[in-house]
Amino acid sequence: MENIEEKPCTLKTCSQKIRAIHDTMDVLSGKWKVSIIACLCYEPMRYSELLKEIPGISGKMLSRELKDLEINNLIVRKVLDTKPVMVSYQITEYGKSLKDLTNVIADWGLQHREKVIKSF
């Protein structure tokens, strides 16, 4: 990731950034939404595929998180014309704007895990 020189943070710009962070965290709150978005950034998936791909998430929680992400226009639920009827979830164009964020979070998590393991 390239370093961009930032202007010194004034009280106003700092407050705006903090407000923007809070807005982002409100949309992506919880333990699972970023993982769901990260999965769907690569390919559309069915409910059962997401349930298998995200270790530890319950079916009830997955349903709730998918609805929240759909309400925020980050994903779309598609009912497929099959027998039996199947449902697929895919990232929207707007949701794709979070792909870089999920990659940065993943990279930081890998570095953090390595650092913590080395400290033991």
Image: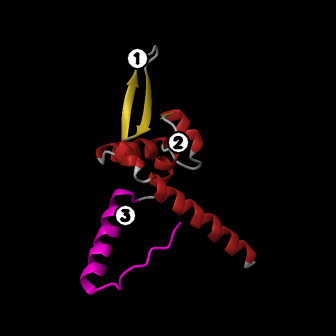
Q: Which of disc 1 and disc 2 is earlier in sequence?
A: 2
Q: Secondary structure at mark 3?
A: helix
Residue 72, percent from left and from top: 30, 48
The reply to whether dot 3 and dot 2 touch (C-beta < 8 Å) is no
Amino acid marked by disc 1 = Asp
Residue 103, percent from left and from top: 53, 57
Residue count near mark 1 (Cα–Cα under 10 Å), binned few <14, some 14–19, many ≥20: few
What residue would you read off at disc 1? 81
Give the residue displayed 52% in from the left and 48% down from the top. 57
What residue would you read off at disc 2? 42
Left or right: residue 59 versus residue 10 is right
Alpha carbon distance from label 2 to label 1: 22 Å
* Residue 77 is covered by the magenta coloring: no
What residue would you read off at disc 3? 25
Residue 40, percent from left and from top: 48, 42
Amino acid marked by disc 2 = Tyr
Q: Secondary structure at mark 2?
A: loop
* Residue 7 is covered by the magenta coloring: yes
Residue count near mark 2 (Cα–Cα under 10 Å), binned few <14, some 14–19, many ≥20: few
Alpha carbon distance from label 3 to label 2: 22 Å
Residue range of the region highlighted in magenta in the rendering: 1-29
The quarter holding residue 52 reads top right
Residue 101, compared with residue 87, is above or below; it is below
Which numbered disc, 3 or 2, marks the residue closer to the eye? 2
Residue 84, compared with residue 25, is above or below; it is above
Colouring convention used in this rendered image of the protein: secondary structure
Left or right: residue 94 versus residue 2 is left
**Split into 4 quadrants, where in the image is the C terminus?**
bottom right
Amino acid marked by disc 3 = Met
